[in-house]
Image (tube, helix red, strand yellow):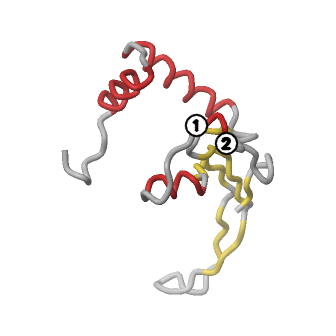
């Protein structure tokens, strides 16, 4: 496997099951339940232990002027949107780049500055 090849979901499930002492079916059930919770809890942010959290990002409707091309100078309205973003914990970055070791994720401070949806 090259450094740039994406991990296949079956590989991830098998490794997770092996490391956690679960069966492959149990690992799949856990990941499915976690994905469902992420979608249900997007309005407050869903923490992913040791990595960060998912949170909803709302943008407001806005107007912009096209700067170039055939439509230069024309004003257009960009509609409001909602996105699901993942905010990475600084510690996870340090661990990923080898500058720190992964601690027990349940001993970490999981508090975030706010629990409000991000507005871009």
At x 72%, y 68%, the residue is 62
Residue 108 is labelled as 2
Position of residue 16 measured from the top left corner of the image (x, y, whole percent) = 40, 27
Please name whichever residue, 33 or 109, is drawn nearer the observer in this view of the structure.
Answer: 109
Label 2 Cα crowd, 10 Å radius (few <14 / some 14-19 / many 20+) = few
The quarter of the picture where residue 42 lies is top right
Q: Against 30, is 76 above or below?
A: below
Say if mark 2 contacts mark 1, CB within 8 Å.
yes
At x 61%, y 49%, the residue is 83
At x 60%, y 86%, the residue is 73
Query: Which residue ends up furthest to the left in the rendered image?
Result: 1
92 vs 16, left or right, is right
Position of residue 113 measured from the top left corner of the image (x, y, whole percent) = 79, 54
Please name whichever residue, 44 or 63, is drawn nearer the observer in this view of the structure.
Answer: 44
Determine which residue is flagged by label 1: 104
112 vs 65, left or right, is right
At x 74%, y 58%, the residue is 119
């Amino acid at each position: 496997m090259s450094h740039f090849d994406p991990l296949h979901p079956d590989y991830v499930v098998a490794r997770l099951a092996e490391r956690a002492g679960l069966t492959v079916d149990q690992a799949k059930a856990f990941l499915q339940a976690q994905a469902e919770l992420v979608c249900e809890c997007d309005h407050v942010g869903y923490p992913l232990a040791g990595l960060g959290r998912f949170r909803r990002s709302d943008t407001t409707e806005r107007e912009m002027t096209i700067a170039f091309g055939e439509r230069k100078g024309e004003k257009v309205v960009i509609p409001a949107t909602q996105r699901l973003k993942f905010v990475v914990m600084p510690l996870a970055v340090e661990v990923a780049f080898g500058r720190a070791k992964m601690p027990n994720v349940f001993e970490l401070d999981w508090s975030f500055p706010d629990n409000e949806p991000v507005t871009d």
